[in-house]
Image: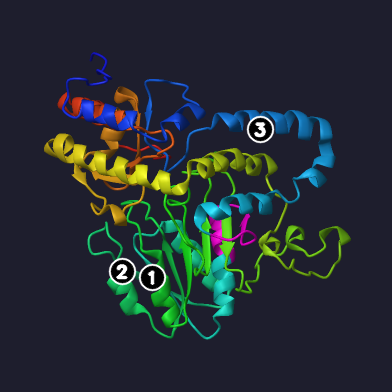
Amino acid sequence: MNPLALGPFTDAPGFVEAQAHDAADELAEYRSRFVFAEPQLIYLDGNSLGRLPVATQQHLHELVAEEWGSRLIASWGEGWWTLGRDTGDLLAPLIGAVPGSVVVSDSTSVCLFKLAWGALRLQSGRSRIITDDLNFPTDLFVLQAAADAAGGGRIEVIPSRDGIHGPVAAIKAALDQDVALVSLSHVVFKSGYLYDMRKITEAAHEVGALVLWDLSHSAGVVNADLSTVDLAVGCTYKYLNGGPGAPAFMYVHPELPLENPLLGWWGHARPFDFDLEYRPASNIARLQTGTMPILSLAAIAPAAQLVAEAGISRIRSKSVALTGYLIDLADEVLAPLGFEVASPRDAARRGSHVSLRHPDAWRVVQSMINDARVVPDFRDPDNIRFGLAPLYVGFGDIHTAVHRIAALIREDRPSQYRRDRSTVT
């Protein structure tokens, strides 16, 4: 079979419009500040792993060569020891938090466990945890583990009516005096549905419940205000572009006396006293446990500084435009070829990724990656997710990607691929 035409599709409807949008884009300059190793590749998976910022390459080179290579152990006292809190302060304004309320430490799952356990310990006498069936499965596993470790508790999973929109009314109806914790994803991982954080938090607080938000799919791309929120957690490797496996962040409201279930020397008030009696730090450092992965932690700052420089409001504005543009093109070009939009059409209730359903989604994704050089990701059973990172994705990328996908469907290229799946999807 001949190679697929990769465009740009200058004669296709909408090409001039896409060019005009890109020419007027206030964030267009940021594209050059990311690594593009393959110019023909259209990377639409920023909701799984963000692109590598150019500044991060230089920053890590200097850290390895100078801080580790030359300064060696002295670097612990020259910035490494406080890096988790310093990076937290850098992230705080990006997620609507105050300085001193955010710390970067551990994986998202470990951070979620710490916060959920701490919340449940504060809610003695309450036994229910409310979540929904749109939440990331690991979050549910962690919530149950935290409940067991904290002395018991029952998770109540509220179903979505359509697998796309959050069951807001049903969640509110389930709230009562027995609810200890409500834990939801701010933007849900499959459909991209965006919860109204303020309204859910207010409803939970009316019955005395605490709320824990997972910001993994919203941090760096959606406006948030954590001023009245109890707890939040999120990863740094999606729209914050911190790199594969970069540590996660934890937010705790400054007035919430949360304990840490995993005691370690990095959370100690005076760690270098090597006291055998544990005394927690008085600040957010108390949520730290063991030695930080400094190289991964250090990679977060250059990328977060790009987000801060561009501004969350401008990023959000472009995100809304990009996702709306993709949905319009999908309706026009891809719907007749078997695709269905599986994300909210209301921009106010949509994050920065768009899901399309297709009955043969797995094989379509393989063809997209290998034939069309368009990289999304697949989520079982039939979701193709397009993560549109506004700092490096343009309207022309989306126009070209949609028409490449249409071409591979018309040429029946997905039929060349096996139905069995790889480990990583």
User: Which part of the image, by quadrant, shows the N terminus?
Assistant: top left
Task: Identify the residue at horizontal 26%, vertical 30% (top origin).
Answer: 18
Q: Are marks 2 and 1 in contact (CB under 8 Å)?
A: yes
State the image quarter where residue 64 is shown: top right
- Quick one: label 3 or label 2, which is nearer the N terminus? 3
Q: Residues within 10 Å of mark 1 (few under 14, many from 20)?
A: some
Q: Is 231 positioned to the left or the right of 38 in the image?
A: right
* Spatial CA span between label 2 and label 1: 8 Å
Mark 1 secondary-structure assignment: helix
Q: Position of residue 341 (x, y in %)?
A: 21, 46
Q: Position of residue 143 (x, y in %)?
A: 49, 66
Task: Identify the residue at horizontal 62%, vertical 53% (top origin).
Answer: 88
- The residue that mark 2 highlights is 168
The residue under label 2 is which amino acid type?
A: Val
The residue under label 1 is which amino acid type?
A: Ile
The residue under label 3 is which amino acid type?
A: Leu
Highlighted magenta segment, given as a residue range: 97-114
Q: Nearer the viewer, residue 154 or 205?
A: 205
Residue 352, compared with residue 120, is above or below; it is above
- The residue that mark 3 highlights is 60
Residue sitting at the far left: 336
- Quick one: label 1 or label 3, which is nearer the N terminus? 3
State the image quarter where residue 55 is shown: top right
